[in-house]
Image (tube, rainbow, N blue to C red):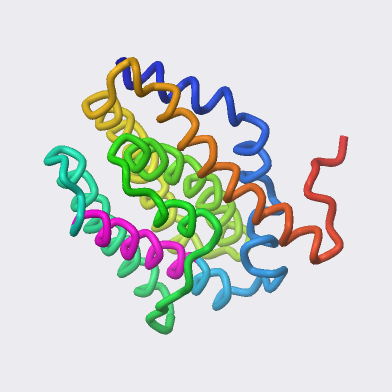
Amino acid sequence: MDGADFLETVRESNATALERLGSEKALVAVTDAALDRERVLETAAAAEARAVATFEAWTDDEADDRAREAFREVAASERDHYDRVCALGDVAAPDPPADALHAYLRELDDTVERAAAGLVARPLVASRTLLQVISFFINESEAGAADVFRELRAETDEGVEAGAAVVAGVCDDADRERAETAAGRAIEAAYGEYVDSLEGLGIDPKPVC
């Protein structure tokens, strides 16, 4: 299976959800409209901590060597991201409960589904939130913090490409539909929580045309 083609299919099939997850409402949704520096940093740190927990758990019980090494690398990268976020402020070390995305991921025990949902869909979602964090710090005239999050986003985007290669390595053509479904469900979980959060705040999650 071709990893780049798989990635393009996931992007195209979930274009609307991904676009809205990258809108200016993204931070409103994940912070419950508490758009201050401390809350934004805490929210960003919590996202990294959730990823660390998910991928460390997968590393412990994954049978496929290639996938297990990929999960280990992502866990280390996300821990580094967490440390870099915490270095920007007095952020308490969180042990956050799983959000909808990670609740879905942690239910998976199949290598193909884990790779597709965790190594491709998850960073596609994370990249869009990080974009809005960058914009937040630009608006706050904090160029240094914005640069840190630019670096985190660039590394996250690189992870998408690497993840697609792992999917291609552990998935044959017969498994492709299952991989696409797992990736789509991960994005749907994140988008569903985004919609619920905004509607709970009385905000229409759809863009104004």
Q: Nearer the viewer, residue 70 or 26?
A: 70
Is residue 119 highlighted in magenta? no
Q: Nearer the viewer, residue 154 or 25?
A: 25
Most common secondary structure along the magenta stretch: helix
Relative to 72, 91 lies left or right = right
**Quarter of image, res 175:** top left
Q: Residue at x 72, y 69 (%)?
A: 33
Tell me residue 200's x, y (percent): 80, 65
Q: Residue at x 61, y 65 (%)?
A: 140
Q: Residue at x 67, y 32 (%)?
A: 16
Q: Quadrant of the N terminus?
A: top left
How many marks do you count on the picture? 0
The residues colored magenta run 44-59
Relative to 124, 28 lies left or right = right
Tell me residue 106's x, y (percent): 40, 57
Look at the picture and state if 183 lies above or below 135: above
Look at the picture and state if 124 lies above or below 133: above
Residue lying at the far left in this picture: please name it: 65
**Quarter of image, res 95:** bottom left
Q: Quadrant of the C terminus?
A: top right
Q: Nearer the viewer, residue 102 or 162?
A: 102
Is residue 56 highlighted in magenta? yes
Tell me residue 46's x, y (percent): 45, 69
Relative to 116, 29 lies left or right = right
Tell me residue 193's x, y (percent): 65, 56
Q: Residue at x 34, y 43 (%)?
A: 114
